[in-house]
């Protein structure tokens, strides 16, 4: 789905380079967040000796008892998906 956004401002400075830099900066921040989230997921995987895909399947099926660690792990999985989705959207953005 193609989305278009119009931005205007009364300024002698060109907005395009500023917007491009802001998007690139946000992509970098999202990348940092993705890396940190992956590190947290790796720590959970080592601690509980299962990968996140198996954990999520078992947690969703209620094969695992609910605990604060498991709730946090599930939250990290959801956070990773959100960050990756946002990064992908911004990486596909084109300023014309």
Image (cartoon, rainbow, N blue to C red):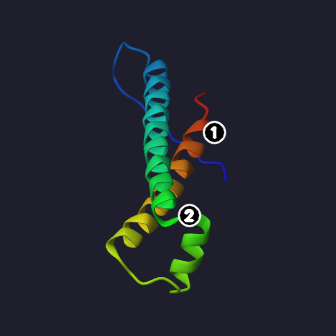
Q: Give the crowd class for mark 2: few <14, some 14-19, many >=20 residues within 10 Å.
A: some
Residue 61: tell me if it is visible: yes
Sooner in the amino-acid sequence: mark 2 or mark 1: 2
Residue drawn at 49 percent across, 45 percent down:
34
The mark lying in front, picked from 2 and 1, is 2
Residues 33 and 85: in front is 33
Q: Give the crowd class for mark 1: few <14, some 14-19, many >=20 residues within 10 Å.
A: few
Marks 2/1: CA–CA distance: 27 Å
As displayed, is residue 57 above or below residue 62?
above
Give residue 28's position: percent from left, percent from top. Answer: 47, 32
Q: Is residue 66 left or right of residue 17?
A: left
As displayed, is residue 36 above or below residue 28?
below
Residues 75 and 95: in front is 75
**Residue highlighted by disc 2:** 52
For the C terminus, which image quadrant?
top right
Q: Quadrant of residue 33?
A: top left
Q: Secondary structure at mark 1?
A: helix
**What residue occupies the far right of the structure in this picture?**
1
Residue drawn at 48 percent across, 55 percent down:
41
Give residue 93's position: percent from left, percent from top. Answer: 59, 37
**Residue highlighted by disc 1:** 92
For the N terminus, which image quadrant?
bottom right
As displayed, is residue 4 above or below residue 76?
above
Specify the label residue 53 is tagged with: none
Q: Are marks 2 and 1 in contact (CB under 8 Å)?
A: no
Give residue 55's position: percent from left, percent from top. Answer: 55, 71
Give residue 25's position: percent from left, percent from top. Answer: 44, 29
Q: Quadrant of residue 91?
A: top right
Residue 4: tell me if it is visible: no
Residue drawn at 48 percent across, 19 percent down:
17
Q: Secondary structure at mark 2?
A: helix
Residues 68 and 14: in front is 68
């Amino acid at each position: 789905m193609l989305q278009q956004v119009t931005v205007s401002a009364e300024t002698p400075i060109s907005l395009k380079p500023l917007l491009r830099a802001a998007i690139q900066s946000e992509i970098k921040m999202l990348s940092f967040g993705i890396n940190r989230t992956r590190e947290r997921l790796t720590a959970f995987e080592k601690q509980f000796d299962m990968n996140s895909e198996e954990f999520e399947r078992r947690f969703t099926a209620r094969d695992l008892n609910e605990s604060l660690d498991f709730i946090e792990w599930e939250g990290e999985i959801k956070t990773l998906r959100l960050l990756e989705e946002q990064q992908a959207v911004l990486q596909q953005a084109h300023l014309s």
